[in-house]
Image: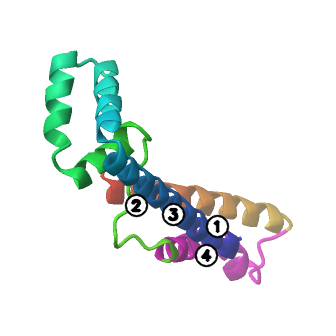
């Protein structure tokens, strides 16, 4: 399970990054070949966001002077895509997912591994199941706490 999730994460991140970069290249081509059309599109988007035509025109004309910045702006507002950073490594993301599944997925099994040889009476299976459920709950809490800590939410 951990391997399939790690590979899925790596491949899906790679595909999403590739798609975003292809769309960015297309937007750059459109900006170079039809800047007036792209500027007009962005003015309309800013008007839809609540700016007056004059304010939207002023803002967009100022931002369109820097093509790289303007294309990234178009990616965010027009396509709602984020341009991946240059150091974004989908295979590292997949490795993190794999390791997380291995670590957090193994902990609930510890009750069975550690306590299986101990005599817990007739309710051994029930007790081990309850321990596994408690460890699962604990790991979900720890995972949520770690996610909150790293994403600062």
Q: From this view, report whether residue 3 is shown above or below residue 29.
A: below
The span from disc 1 to disc 3 (Cα, nearest Å) is 15 Å
Q: Which mark is residue 8?
A: 1
Q: Which mark is residue 102?
A: 4
Nearest to the observer: residue 5 or residue 90: 90
**Residue tagged by mark 3?**
18
Question: Badge 2: few (under 14), some or many (20 or more) residues near its Cα, within 10 Å?
Answer: few
Question: Badge 4: few (under 14), some or many (20 or more) residues near its Cα, within 10 Å?
Answer: some
Residue 36 position within the rendered picture, expressed as x and y whole percent measured from the top left: 29, 35
**Residue tagged by mark 2?**
146
The span from disc 4 to disc 1 (Cα, nearest Å) is 15 Å
The answer to which of marks 4 and 1 sits earlier in the sequence is: 1
Question: Residue drawn at (69%, 71%), measured in percent from left and top?
Answer: 4
One can see residue 138 in this view: no
Q: From this view, report whether residue 27 is shown above or below residue 84.
A: above
Find the magenta span and give its range: 92-121
Q: Is residue 128 magenta?
A: no
Q: Secondary structure at mark 4?
A: helix
Foreground mark, 4 or 1, reads 1
Question: Badge 1: few (under 14), some or many (20 or more) residues near its Cα, within 10 Å?
Answer: some
Q: From this view, report whether residue 2 is shown above or below residue 117.
A: above
Residue 16 position within the rendered picture, expressed as x and y whole percent measured from the top left: 53, 58
The span from disc 3 to disc 4 (Cα, nearest Å) is 28 Å
Question: Residue drawn at (31%, 22%), measured in percent from left and top?
Answer: 49
Question: Badge 3: few (under 14), some or many (20 or more) residues near its Cα, within 10 Å?
Answer: some
The answer to which of marks 1 and 3 sits earlier in the sequence is: 1
Residue 80 position within the rendered picture, expressed as x and y whole percent measured from the top left: 43, 41
């Amino acid at each position: 399970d951990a391997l399939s999730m790690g590979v899925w994460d790596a491949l899906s991140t790679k595909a999403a990054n590739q798609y975003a970069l292809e769309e960015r290249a297309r937007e750059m081509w459109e900006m170079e070949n039809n800047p007036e059309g792209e500027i007009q599109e962005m003015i309309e988007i800013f008007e839809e966001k609540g700016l007056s035509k004059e304010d939207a025109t002023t803002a967009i004309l100022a931002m369109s002077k820097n093509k790289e910045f303007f294309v990234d702006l178009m990616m965010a507002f027009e396509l709602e895509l984020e341009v991946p950073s240059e150091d974004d490594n989908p295979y590292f993301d997949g490795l993190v997912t794999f390791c997380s599944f291995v670590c957090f997925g193994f902990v609930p099994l510890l009750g069975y591994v550690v306590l299986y040889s101990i005599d817990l009476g007739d309710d051994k299976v029930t007790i081990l199941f309850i321990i596994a459920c408690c460890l699962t709950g604990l790991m979900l809490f720890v995972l949520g706490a770690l996610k909150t800590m790293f994403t600062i939410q």
